[in-house]
Image (tube, coloured by chain):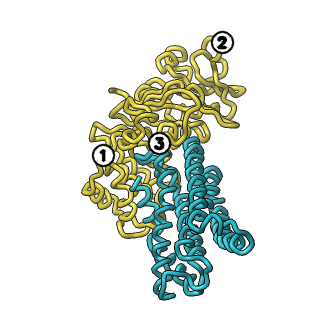
Amino acid sequence: MDHVIELKNVNKSYNHFSVSNVSVQIKKGFVTGIIGSNGAGKSTIMRMILNLVKPDSGDVHIFGMDYAKHEKSIKDRIGFIYSEDVLYDELTLQDQKKLIAPCYSQWDDTLFRQYCDTFELPLKQKLKSFSKGMKVKATLAIALSHKADLLIMDEPTAGLDPVFRREFLDIMQDIMLDGNKSIVLSTHIMSDLSTIADYITYVQKGRIAFSKEIHELQENYAVVRGGIELLDRDTEQCFLAIKKTRTGFEGLSANLNEAESLFGNEAVIEKASLEDIMYYMQGGKNVAVVN
Amino acid sequence: MLLLIKKDLVIHKLSWLLYFAMLLFFMMFNKDVLFVVAIMSAIVIMNTFHFDELANGNKLWNSLPFTRKEIVSARYNTLLVVLIIVTTVAMAAARIINGEWSSAFSSLAIWEEVIGSFIVMTVSASIFFPLVYKFAQKKTIFTFVLLFIGTSIAGAYAVSYLYKYLIESTSIIQSMGNGLYWATLAFGSLVCYVLSWGLSLKIYKAKEFI
């Protein structure tokens, strides 16, 4: 089985927001970043993957199984990290571990202690005295100690300082050395992903705008800047989104080679970062999305 | 499910000492077993909801290998376990303080008080558990805690005064017998509890953890 997660035609509607016709496959053994601006629908998709929210229609398969029949065996193989605390403040990490460990069939106490040592987590201190970063590490230690095949992280680095974010990403890279684990990470902090993600799924207004290999994005997507006279009906077809001023334009192209052959040296062409892609796709200020 | 029941009991940690101290305090002030068991069970079970809500416990336990059915069922079972623990301690305290198996000033026999507290708690829980599952959030859970405790206290007095009224002003209990009277009420409350259990399951299965 190549896919750890498979969403097929998934829909979920709320009063002022909906996730529409989401179909996506997450490959086994890779880090997949789910990106999108705040309110794009990333967390709703993550929650449907975790069965915290049930879709109105469509299929969600994890490890090839569905929640209706295999809820416990699916969850037994998933580790999770949320942006908010899900541990009891009045308990120590040791107490919390005692509650959670028996829930998993493959819990490894030695591994847990190793992670606590590595992350410098005090076992006998109440969780309310932990910093935000320590709480994330504690959740991570728990998620890793039951040998989860799939780690699902919903904005795990939100609200963390840059030093800890870097440390967290290093830990993620170490985890992936295993080769059998898969990570799905939702974030709106692009720099988190450029170093660790293998695939990027971009969610825009409740829909999947694209789901691609990060190298493909880095190699093919380009930001083009040039004079307004370079634009006409034909050249505009090269862009996914264009920002025009009286004298010039900036545009996002999904085809670097085509942009280079069209504009040559007359425009400045640079490889687009994930942040650029998100900005232009999102239709940042004065950006027109070209259909 | 046993793990979830254990969790419901363990998360109180040292609060149990406070609960038992409160229980002894009430017993020392000649409160009857019915009242003490009702109020203490209400405090313990609603604090369980409270702790869970504050810690995003619903999100945590729904991400662990449990079904929603197990999570709700565990809570209904936890109340029964709490009732057994609190009743045992209250009866032991009554025995030590009063030197006999009865409350100091209660008109009820101790077994009637035990059944009475069971009725009060199961009926109160039958009303409140579905409401908590449907509406409680971090900001509102404390209100539910207070309302549940208030209802349990009122329920304890209601059961006690209803019995007194029926004995003094009617011949219902005399004609049907004490045993049948309490058995009927206990059975009725158990039916309420089971129906409430089903309703909570339905509510919780449709709930979204955002």
The answer to whether residue B84 is left or right of residue B119 is: left
Q: Of the residues under marks 3 and 2, which one precedes in the sequence?
A: 3
The residues tagged by marks 2 and 1 sit, at their Cα atoms, a distance apart of 55 Å
Mark 2 burial class by Cα count in 10 Å: few <14, some 14-19, many 20+: few
Residue A147 got which mark?
A: 1
Rendered position, A215 above or below A87: above
Label 1 near label 3: C-beta < 8 Å? no
Mark 3 burial class by Cα count in 10 Å: few <14, some 14-19, many 20+: some
Mark 1 burial class by Cα count in 10 Å: few <14, some 14-19, many 20+: many
Rendered position, B183 above or below A282: below
Whether residue A141 is visible: no
Q: Of the residues under marks 2 and 1, which one precedes in the sequence?
A: 1
Residue in the foreground of this view, choosing between B141 and B46: B46
- Name the chain under label 2: A
Estimate the x, y position of residue A226 in percent, counting from the top left.
60, 24
Q: Badge 2 is on which residue? A: A233
Q: Which chain is yellow?
A: A
Amino acid at the residue labelled 2: Arg
Q: Residue furthest left?
A: A110
Q: Of the residues under marks 3 and 1, which one precedes in the sequence?
A: 1
For chain B, what colour was chosen?
A: cyan
Amino acid at the residue labelled 1: Lys
- Name the chain under label 3: A
The answer to whether residue A44 is left or right of residue A284 is: left
Q: Badge 3 is on which residue? A: A191
Estimate the x, y position of residue A159 in percent, counting from the top left.
52, 54
Estimate the x, y position of residue B182 in percent, counting from the top left.
58, 65
Amino acid at the residue labelled 3: Ser
Q: Residue furthest right?
A: B169
The residues tagged by marks 3 and 2 sit, at their Cα atoms, a distance apart of 35 Å
